[in-house]
Image (cartoon, helix red, strand yellow):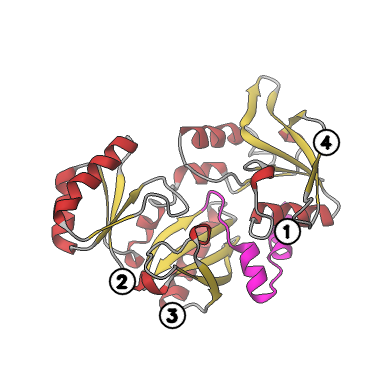
Amino acid sequence: MIIALQMDPIESINITTDTSFMIGLEAQKRGFQLFCYQPQNLSLSLNGLKANGHFVKLYDNPNHYFEKQDPVLFDLKQADIVWVRQDPPFDLAYITATYLLDTIASTTLVLNSPKSIRDYPEKLLPFQFQEFMAPTLISRNIEDFYNFFETHQDVILKPLYGAKGHAVIRLQHKENLGGAIDLFEALTDTPFIMQKFIPEVSLGDKRILFVDGDVVGAFKRIPQTGYIRSNIVLGGTAELCDLTDKEQKLAKVLGPFLKEKGLFLAGIDVIGDYLTEINITSPTGYALLNRLNNQKNHEIIWNKALEKL
């Protein structure tokens, strides 16, 4: 079998936390060949969808964790599974890559489904499960933002298509609102999000991980003292946790949806009692969950992927 990984540059990953590396290493242990490429190296013609990339060997050694073969132009229809694993930003380039992968999705297993990645942006998808959401506004209309702020007084402003906690701003004073909105309008031509601030964020947010619609575990990400962003890449720490009754209810509602839409890997973020995001582009945390409780998510993921194949 040939496994293709559409991912960020392999030279830049952290193998102790990178889910793509974990997926690739387990594939290799099962005797599969690995082909890695970046989405900008896709090419579609009348001869099919091809990618410039490298067949690689992976090693569980942080000082020498990969070896590349010479670059090749590979026909992705020859892959048994293509994993979509590059990080956001979820921009026109990301969306275009999903359209290109659509051309092979009827004959090649692509995980996650490129159509569903495109149809369900991570910060918009929670609106399909509004009973679990915090008060949230998506807009570019400054009057709407002022009205939302008047109602809630303490809010978070963030980009609609951002990731990893970048550009997340807390606003508690009305006089700061105009300047923050001006900044966001200068940074992006898309709408952005205002959300009621959830005080429990100081105690950490929860990442709940799914594989093919089933929960495989959860951990709490705890921010550094004095910070509201708990992302691991921003210095947050992680500890195992259980699901509350409300989170179990959410999982029962969300799981079948993820499975039906081909969103094979997904990680949801919960703060307090509220669902804030549903991560489906390149959800992380599976390798971290392995380390926290000696779990074998790499085996769970591949066993379920091969069932689908």
SS of the residue under disc 3: helix
Return the x and y of residue 35 as percentages of the image width and height.
76, 40
SS of the residue under disc 2: helix
Q: Quadrant of residue 245?
A: bottom left
Q: Could you say which disc has been placed on residue 245 in the image?
A: 3
SS of the residue under disc 4: loop
**Left or right, 94 with reference to 271:** right
Q: Is residue 109 visible?
A: no
Return the x and y of residue 66 as percentages of the image width and height.
78, 47
Q: Could you say which disc has been placed on residue 302 in the image?
A: 1
First in residue order: circle 2 vs circle 1 = 2
The residue at the point 69 percent across, 43 percent down is 11
First in residue order: circle 1 vs circle 3 = 3
First in residue order: circle 1 vs circle 4 = 4
The residue at the point 76 percent across, 35 percent down is 54
Range shown magenta:
280-309
The answer to whether the residues at label 1 and label 4 have Cβ atoms under 8 Å apart is: no
**Left or right, 62 with reference to 262:** right
Label 4, label 3: how many angstroms apart (C-alpha)?
50 Å
The amino acid beneath tag 1 is Trp
Give yes or no for residue 298 being in the magenta stretch. yes
The residue at the point 33 percent across, 62 percent down is 130
The amino acid beneath tag 4 is Gln
Q: Which residue is mark 2?
A: 199
Q: Which residue is mark 4?
A: 69
First in residue order: circle 4 vs circle 3 = 4
Return the x and y of residue 122 as percentages of the image width and height.
44, 51
Label 4, label 2: how many angstroms apart (C-alpha)?
50 Å
The answer to whether the residues at label 3 and label 2 have Cβ atoms under 8 Å apart is: no
Label 3, label 2: how many angstroms apart (C-alpha)?
20 Å
Q: Nearer the viewer, mark 2 or mark 1?
A: 2
The amino acid beneath tag 3 is Asp
